[in-house]
Amino acid sequence: MSNTRYGVLVVNLGTPDAPTTQAVRRYLNRFLSDRRVVDLPPILWQPLLKGLITPIRAPRSANNYQKIWMPTGSPLHVYSDAIVANLRQALSQLSTPHIAVELAMSYSNPSIAEGIRKLEAAHITDLIVLPLYPQYANSTTAAVFDAVVQTLQTSAYLPQLHFIRDYYAHPAYISALQHSVNQHIQEHGKPQKLLLSFHGLPMRAVNKGDPYPSQCEATAKTLAQSLALTSEDWLLCYQSRFGKAAWLPPETLGTLKALPSQGITEVAVICPGFAADCLETLEEIAMLNRNAFLAAGGKQYHYIPALNASPQHIDALIQIIKQFML
């Protein structure tokens, strides 16, 4: 036991280096070139991606990033950094010695390879990989696994690998979400409807057997039960659609536009699949969707922030990590 040296690699998706068209274009080209994300043959996809999709999307996305960019950088990076810093501090208090913690991003810096190399330099014996995706998806979690394995293939020494596949119904994770919703209700009152909005997934992936939808449903139902909500109190929906292909229904934006005509004019939205606030929560949910709801006749709209570096989130992540420590 005393010779065990743990390394925890906390992984998030990634973010542009700056809220500029050029930086966003580089990021999108890297992100959307991953075959786990878009499984079309590169000979067909790459000309379309680089010749049409990113030239159109990059300026628009850069403008959206400018709306949410923080003085210290991209929100996703800032909050992910804070999560890692707080995890590092909390884990250092455990009786188990030798725990190193590093942040990595799948499609930006610091890379997964860089994070692993830093942990190897700390002479770890056990590598615990924690993708910040509570619900497994082939396009997110599996992409992290691919990059970890690819990096370890060139390592002179292979550590014991512990890969955290998901934690969609872990009691501590649900408890952290429950605390966040209850805190919001204490401050703003109970909404007529609580929307649990998860990132969307193309039906093409669902039809191939991706477990993501079932895990989102399990998270939503478990959280609703912990909050003692009735079936009339909440809705599950999916956001961030892209392209013309069929995606998981129901769509968050369309749902919000329709609710006022059904007499639902007070809503709160939480995004349980996002560990850290980012473009999809701060711009899409907190701004774009809010405006659409109010324009449709809504009266009160609140976005409940992601767990970010809250004490409850850090505690949950520690409990999840500790399952893999002997």
Image (cartoon, rainbow, N blue to C red):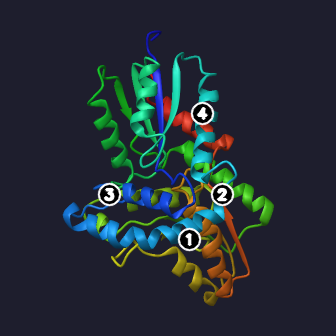
Task: Quickly name the residue at label 1.
Answer: 231
Q: Residues within 10 Å of mark 3 (few under 14, many from 20)?
A: some
The disc at residue 305 is: 2
Tag 1: amino acid: Ser
Labels 3, 2: front one: 3
Camera-side residue: 206 or 45?
45
Tag 4: amino acid: Leu
Distance of label 2 from label 4 (alpha carbons): 19 Å
Give the farthest residue toward the bottom. 261
User: In percent of the image, x 38 and y 43: which residue is there?
Assistant: 165
User: In percent of the image, x 38 and y 59: which residue is there?
Assistant: 29
Task: Quickly name the residue at label 3.
Answer: 33
Q: Residues within 10 Å of mark 2 (few under 14, many from 20)?
A: many
- Coordinates of residue 201 in the picture (x, y in percent): 38, 65
- Coordinates of residue 70 in the picture (x, y in percent): 67, 54
User: In percent of the image, x 57 and y 47: which residue is there?
Assistant: 77
Mark 1 or mark 3: name the one nearer the start of the chain.
Answer: 3
